[in-house]
Image (cartoon, rainbow, N blue to C red):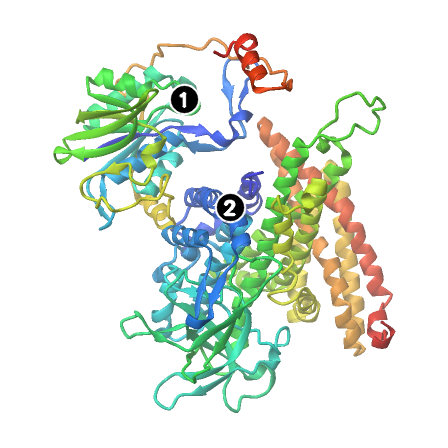
Amino acid sequence: MSDTLVNMRDVRFVLYEMLDVEQLTKYEYFADHSRETFDIALDAAYKLAKEVFWPAYVPMDKQGVSLDTANNKATVAKEMHEIWAAAREGNWQGISGPAEYGGQQFPGTISAAVHFIQNAANTAAHMYIGSCAGAARLIYSFASEELKQIYVEKLFTGQWGGTMCLTEPQAGSSLSDVKTTAVPAKDGDYYLITGTKCFISNGDHDLAENIIHPVLARLPGAPPGVKGISLFVVPKYRVNDDGSVGEFNDVITAGFEHKLGLKGNFTATLSFGDEGKCRGWLLGEANKGLTYMFQLMNEARIATGSQATSVASNAFFHALEYSKERFQGRRITEKDPTTPPIAIIKHADIRRMLLIQKATVEGVFALLAYAAFVADKEHASPSAEERENANLVLELLTPVCKAYGSEAAYDAIIQAIQCYGGYGFSEDFPLAQMLRDCKVFPIYEGTNYMQAMDLLGRKVPMKGGKGFQALVAAATKTVKEAASIEQLKPLAEKIGAALKIVGETTMHLAGIAGKGDIELYMYSSATYIKMFSPMVVGWLLLWQAVVAKKALEKGAGEADVKYYKGKIETARFYINHEIPHLEANAQIMKSNERTAIDFDEEWF
Amino acid sequence: MKILVPLKRVCDPDNANKVKVSGDGKAVTSEGLEWKPNPFDEYAVEAALRLNENAAKNEKLGEIVVCSIGVADVAQTIRQALAMGADRGILVTADDGALESTVVARALKALVEKEKPDLVLMGKQTVDGDSNAVGQMLAEMLGWPMATFVASISTSDGGKSLNVKREVDMGVVTLKVTTPAVVTVDLRIVSPEAVKNGATPDSHKYNEGPRYASLKGIMQAKKKKIDQLELPALGSDATPATTYPRFELPPARSGSCTFVESVDALVDKLKNQAKAF
């Protein structure tokens, strides 16, 4: 079994050679950091992931979680308790939290790399850890000083766990149908919460003494739809004046899901206020809940892309090792059946499948790191213009990280299983679990179609298409640079053409929207994101090829020469294999394809 | 207690099979591999931390100085030990190729005379050269008591002596060593109950293995001092006692496999053909 989770050479390439993440330490907010703290943190994360997270990956899947309904007591695997303790000791819950609230204030780009490593080792486990910071940052960003003092540090230090409670049985993708209510209490500054939330990841467990639920609910008389949704902080146990954990807050765990994957994570159905005693505190202003929640949802969407791609990374290294060890068949040109069989990696088609995985993992990791890097700039840059540009690009890339990351990773794991042959289909190897774990990523945190609608309906036209233009400008710069390098010229031309095709298709669709055919416009979004995403990833891989080529010209050691050559050829493989599909997808949209819109449901 | 822990970086032991002999046969190269602290030295850091703390009260009881000899990048390996909790570092800069056991032992002797620790605690050997020599040489040069392959330590006489258990081929040897002393540690020194210092309650159970650096520790380590000095400034002789004229790989194994019919046949083959016993 492979114990390589992530290619750390590639992580360092992206952070230092491609993005030059050290430049972030020039910003005051990150001034306490340096390349050295980054390197030591990455090494420490990898060591912990490999020695503590990864050995628990299969056992947590086998063991699952349990619930004693009579005593409302949720239990997770003992291995998860060990991971939780180690994560707390190492302050990993608070890696990117502000120092004033117990965080370590690392740039998000570094924590993106750390999360990638931890997710690669055990993504169900990492969810418990990551959700602390998600809830903490939500409260930190929007809540009153009083609520911040109560909750933020305890979440960033992992003393308490966190969740996000949006979905209800009748309101999944459609949050406008949220029914949970919040009624102002007669005797205090709190609200009484009543309702049911389901599919709540990390929703209950015995890892922490308290769990803090940010809950979407409606105030009496609130306007219908998303404009009437407010956000509340609802602890599992109420908090005493001295900050200690007090009495039970009437949050009942009604059950947990028996899932296809991520079985080590407790996915709860939570019933708030069965006894009418569930107290919640309004987070920020009334009726602005969804706006606030979007901060957390955007983080969670990028995190979902990371979860998927990191599992694909682990699967890729398994497939790579297996392909070197499994001997089968002879070269296509070898006619003598008495010659010894060769390692299957010597077959071109195995290498093709491995390349699909390598390109996906490295390309999407670059995308995730770039998105985090842009988010760091949005957060810490002193220049208002840079912050605004960063915000627009980040908004644009978020649905791509989530939707493309989750789909491409799933496809990559399928290729990893294919490399294993029949053994890939067996639960005796961890590949089957990886595939099961990854199926949820195109579904949760907003289905991939929601992401597609978000991209085409909201993000591309946002501020007159400014974000889209900024992205195209950045990509065009890379294309120009690559075109001046003989070896990369053909790749540069293909990405240049792709930018043009995406631009034209966007204009075509804008025309459809302009004519008022909103149904066709949004229907096209699923194809649009399929076209758009490879343009982005192809650009990032081309950027990497440029960096690698320059490093080769400067002179590199033997191992680095192999790495850089592999990098350039990976970009070539991806661009040659994926970019042509982009054009096909453009044709589908340009032909105003609308069969599914008009297809009568009786015809199924 | 003041403890000096010598720490060497080695190329990633998990990828030791990727080490190569250079084209001219003059050196072993590890290009492209990551540097890691020598595992046994990391165990020594952990043992030093356990000796010098009250783990129940989170109190420090003494100073731990981590030293290394090598190129400037080695500072990062020292920094990792500081992130685990050691107090300060000393880096003696020298070319990696110039480090042979006697040169290292002499440099450490000079450092010991400068720092005057109560205890030198180090790995029994480094996993690159596997010489298993520096600790013994250092004790001899200093004229200090020595215990090697130590798998457990408990302090006695208020820290003036150490009761140690050494793992040897025939079993476990128990010794009492008076400080100052040189102690080299084996793998089991990081088992949960291997170190007793009279301050941490005996009931305290450590995790198996060296502790992980925390992010807080990493940020604190950044502020801890690492003194740098050059090898000649220590005044120790840098002439190696042994030189390696040439390295070559052992001949590749044929990898053949034969099946035998019975256990008796296997024993016969092992005895008469392979001459294994």
Q: Which of B149 and A294 is in front in this view?
A: B149
Residue A47 percent coordinates (x, y): 45, 42
Q: Mark 2 points at which residue?
A: A54
Answer with the quarter of the image where residue A546 lies: top right
A402 left or right of A534?
A: left
A313 left or right of A115?
A: right
Establish if A488 lies above or below A367.
above
Confirm whether circles 1 and 2 share one chain.
no
Look at label 2 and name its amino acid. Trp
Establish if A217 lies above or below A431.
below
A382 left or right of B63?
A: right
Look at label 1 and name its amino acid. Asp
Q: Name the residue under label 1.
A: B95
Q: Of discs 1 and 2, which sits in the foreground?
A: 2
Residue B182 percent coordinates (x, y): 24, 24
Q: What element carries label 2?
A: helix
Q: What element carries label 1?
A: loop
Quadrant of the rendering where the N terminus of chain B is positioned = top left
Answer with the quarter of the image where residue A297 lies: bottom right
The answer to whether residue B87 is seen in the rendering is: no
Name the residue: 53% across, 42% down: A12
Proximity of marks 1 and 2: CB atoms separated by less than 8 Å: no
Report crowding for label 2: few under 14, some 14 to 19, many 20 or more residues within 10 A (C-alpha).
Answer: many
Q: Which of A454 and A242 is in front in this view?
A: A242
Numbered-mark total: 2
Name the residue: 63% across, 60% down: A440
